[in-house]
Image (cartoon, coloured by chain):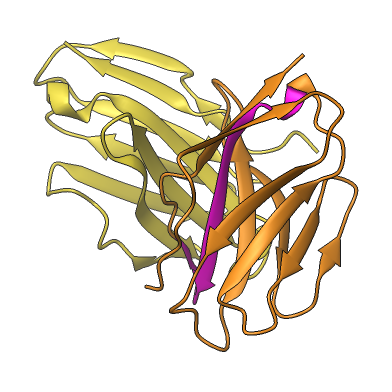
Amino acid sequence: DAGVIQSPRHEVTEMGQEVTLRCKPISGHNSLFWYRQTMMRGLELLIYFNNNVPIDDSGMPEDRFSAKMPNASFSTLKIQPSEPRDSAVYFCASTRGTVGELFFGEGSRLTVL
Amino acid sequence: DAKTTQPNSMESNEEEPVHLPCNHSTISGTDYIHWYRQLPSQGPEYVIHGLTSNVNNRMASLAIAEDRKSSTLILHRATLRDAAVYYCILDSSYKLIFGSGTRLLVRP
């Protein structure tokens, strides 16, 4: 299996621009998580999907952030408009069931200038 | 969410055993104890998890105290590739909430 696939691996953009991060979970996994990691705040859980339905988005920082999972093999995290404080590494993770062994992607490093 | 407490950093010599402690005094009866590690520039990686009994796998062993208020991750022979941040996490429902972890330095 290819593992969790995230794209892009690196993104540099200017403040105010829209950013879309993509994630392909492992086939057969029905739970998907988006995390954000910064030096200051560590790893933060942003949103959790189960069977393509958002179950808990309490970690989404503000309305500028939105996430979708249109089908079992694809999810997006969108930031519009982006701000410098959104600079971070964004990780997608998936698992079968609720929580067992969570498989993380390699992350998308976002820099907002 | 129940919290965990880990030392900020630990050091070990290569090929020696490492015992990484974690305190979780407010753990509930249904919380699983998970350990993940994060190598530099990579996403977190599952290491091991358990509920009450000690657990072993190819990567490590997990020793859980009888009262479950603490646990220890044991790396039997540390290698340079084991240098990473190790996270002890309690699984409350579906959420894995990562703390600051323990940064393990392995000396050659």
Which residue appears at 44% of the width and 58% of the height?
Answer: B5
Give the answer, above or below, for where A18 lies relative to A76.
above
Residue sitting at the far bottom: B29
Q: Main secondary structure of the magenta part?
A: strand
Q: Does residue A13 appear in the picture of this structure?
A: yes
The answer to which image quadrant residue B11 occupies is top right
Residue B2: image location, x then y, percent: 41, 73
Residue range of the region highlighted in magenta in the rendering: B81-96
Q: Does residue A104 appear in the picture of this structure?
A: no
Which residue appears at 41% of the width and 51% of the height?
Answer: B99
Left or right of B3 on screen, residue B103: right
Left or right of B99 on screen, residue B38: right
Pick whichever, A102 or B105, lies toward us.
Answer: B105
Residue B64: image location, x then y, percent: 71, 71
Q: Residue B91 colored magenta?
A: yes
Numbered label tally = 0
Left or right of A79 on screen, residue B85: right
Q: Which chain is orange?
A: B
Q: Residue A66 colored magenta?
A: no
Which quadrant of the rendered structure holds the C terminus of chain A?
A: top left
Q: Which chain is yellow?
A: A
Which residue appears at 75% of the width and 33% of the height?
Answer: A2
